[in-house]
Image (cartoon, rainbow, N blue to C red):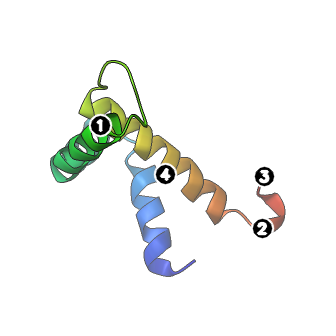
Amino acid sequence: MTPKTLDRYELTFASLSGNGSYPSLIYRLSQRRNAKAIAKEHHVAMLANDITGEPLDTSTNSMYIQHIGTMMGAIAALPETSRP
């Protein structure tokens, strides 16, 4: 992992600390940057019948993706012998 990659994870984990205002800023920034792309890809997946049912809210999709990305990043930052 490069120092730049680790900086991204440090920013993510730092966003989880504090009084709640910093995480809120991080999530709002992420929403602004990614909302259109997430909504578009969700629509494309629905048209292709890759997903069905009621469309999920864009912010719900975004938070789920961020959660999975955070977990993958945390696992990748572990020593290889500690990874699942």
Q: Name the residue under label 2.
A: 80
- Considering only order in the chain, which callout, 1 or 4, is on the residue closer to the N terminus? 1
- Considering only order in the chain, which callout, 2 or 4, is on the residue closer to the N terminus? 4
- Please tell me how crowded label 1 is: few (under 14), some (14-19), or many (20+) other residues with Cα within 10 Å: few
Measured Cα–Cα span from mark 3 to mark 2: 9 Å
- Considering only order in the chain, which callout, 3 or 4, is on the residue closer to the N terminus? 4
Could you say whether the residue bearing mark 1 is in a helix, strand or loop?
helix
- In the rendered structure, which amino acid carries the disc numbered 2? Glu
**Whether residue 19 can be seen here:** no
| Tag shown at residue 56 | none
Q: Mark 4 points at which residue?
A: 69
Q: Residue at x 37, y 47 (%)?
A: 15
- In the rendered structure, which amino acid carries the disc numbered 4? Gly
- Considering only order in the chain, which callout, 1 or 3, is on the residue closer to the N terminus? 1
Q: In this view, does 81 lie above or below 68?
A: below
Q: In this view, does 1 lie above or below 56?
A: below
Residues at circles 4 and 1 in contact by the CB criterion of under 8 Å: no
Could you say whether the residue bearing mark 2 is in a helix, strand or loop?
helix
Could you say whether the residue bearing mark 3 is in a helix, strand or loop?
loop
- Considering only order in the chain, which callout, 2 or 1, is on the residue closer to the N terminus? 1
Residues at circles 1 and 2 in contact by the CB criterion of under 8 Å: no
Q: Name the residue under label 3.
A: 84
Mark 4 vs mark 1, foreground winner is: 1
Q: Mark 1 points at which residue?
A: 47
- Please tell me how crowded label 3 is: few (under 14), some (14-19), or many (20+) other residues with Cα within 10 Å: few
- Please tell me how crowded label 2 is: few (under 14), some (14-19), or many (20+) other residues with Cα within 10 Å: few
